[in-house]
Structure formats: C-alpha cells, structure tokens
Image (tube, rainbow, N blue to C red):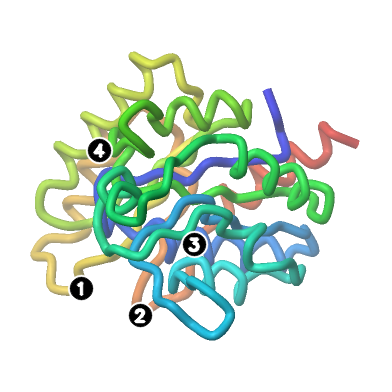
Amino acid sequence: MNPHTFYITGTDTDAGKTWVTTECLKALSANNIKAVGMKPIASGCEMTSEGLRNDDALKLIAASPISLPYTLINPVALLEPTAPEIAARHDAVEISLEPVLNAYRQVKKAADFVLVEGVGGWLAPLSETIDQSDLVRALDCTVILVVGLKLGCINHARLTERALKEEGIDCAGWIAAGTDPDLLFAEEYFEALQRCIATPFLGRVFADRPRQLENFVALVGAASAAIK
C-alpha cells in the first residue's frame, strides 16, 4: 500500500470534498508536512487564455505549499459541468488512467504526500469503463471519505462505507463537512454518524469555526514516521 497518497472521495456531489481537501492541505502545511492536492479529472472547467481551468483544482493549488504546473494537478480537464463520462463524450475526449498516473508520478516526486480528490460520490464512474476504484487501485492508496452534514447524509454515509468494504477498498477514515449551515439538529446528525459508521473519525470542518483535523494530521504523521 502506498503510504504517500490519500484519495478523497465523498458520499455524493457537493459533500464538501474540495473544501475538506484544502483544509487538510492547510493543516498539513501548518505542521510542516509538504502535501499537494490533485484534481485529476475535473468537469465544469472554464476556457481561459491559458486553457481550460477548473475552480476546484485552482483552490487545491492555492492551498498547496508547492507550486506545480496546472496540467499536473488537473491532467484531464473537461468543459461541461456534468458527470465526467458525459462531459468527456461532449468534448470528444476518451478518459484513461494513463495521463492521470503520469501526472501523479511527477507530483509525487515534489511532495511528501499527495491528496487526490475524486469526482462526485464514490460510485460515480470516471468513464463508461473506469470506476474510481480502478484509479484507487492503480494509485495503490487508501481512501478518506468526506460526509457532508445535510439531509440524507446518514443513509449516504452508510451506503458508501458498505460499497467501499464490498469492493475491498481500504478506508483510512471519514471527515465531516458542515456543508449545510441551516441543517436542523446538525449535532445530532453528527453524533448519529459517529455511532453508525465503523470507519475511524478523522476530523471535521466548519463554516464558522476553526477546522478540527488533529486525527487526520496524526494519521499522516504516523505514515510519515513509518516511511522514515
């Protein structure tokens, strides 16, 4: 298993993957751990004078302490703001793992750790023939699950945890994201998630309070010590 890399997936679209990944990058940087975020496949990009650019990928770049070319952070950029397999069809692009893995190998050389942000929810495919589990296996890494605190999150979290287990994917833990500031009984939802998810709890990010990612930083710190 590759201890240098974590794949950040979510329970569904808008679970808070980018937000959590950027906060994780900042937390690692504050602890003198050099990490870079990747958004290998991104749809909903905008055409600029420098080519297609994705807002999520740009946020990861801004949160990373190491400056790398955009094309390494987001090697597969798609125009339409929809599922990657559909966006690729409209862009006449065939998604494959090769450009993603080539970019990843270069990013990995520049950083101690790489946080790779996935697409949508865990079972959202990358293409008609490639699932996110295929990429995780190719990267030989563990997954971190982001759970957005909103209506339906308990069901989504349990289903995603079950899917990861059934596919034999190692999940290092889960992080809660306060994506819905108007959610009634948010703390009770959080407590329910802690009771019904067997995966270790790694932290929480808030819109109005400092992040709580000590468990995540400890996990990465332990991996760093094991590598040395």
Contact between marks 2 and 4 (CB within 8 A): the answer is no
Dividing the picture into quarters, in which one does residue 200 lie? Answer: top left
Determine which residue is flagged by label 3: 212
Q: CA distance from mark 1 to mark 3?
A: 17 Å
Residue at figure coordinates x 18%, y 51% from the top left: 189
In depth, the one of 33 and 209 nearer the eye is: 33
Q: Quadrant of the C terminus?
A: top right
Contact between marks 1 and 2 (CB within 8 A): the answer is yes
Locate residue 66, reporting x and y percent. 76, 68
In depth, the one of 48 and 227 nearer the eye is: 48
What amino acid is found at the position of numbered circle 1 in the picture? Pro
- Left or right relative to 121: residue 222: right
Q: Earlier in the sequence, mark 2 or mark 4?
A: 4
Determine which residue is flagged by label 1: 181
Q: Secondary structure at mark 2?
A: loop
Residue at figure coordinates x 73%, y 71% from the top left: 65
Q: CA distance from mark 3 to mark 4?
A: 20 Å
Q: Nearer the viewer, mark 1 or mark 3?
A: 1
What amino acid is found at the position of numbered circle 3 in the picture? Gln
Tag 1: Cα neighbours inside 10 Å, few (<14), some, or many (≥20)? few
**Residue 157 bears which disc, if any?**
4
What amino acid is found at the position of numbered circle 4 in the picture? Ala
Residue at figure coordinates x 40%, y 76% from the top left: 46
Q: Quadrant of the N terminus?
A: top right
Q: Secondary structure at mark 1?
A: loop
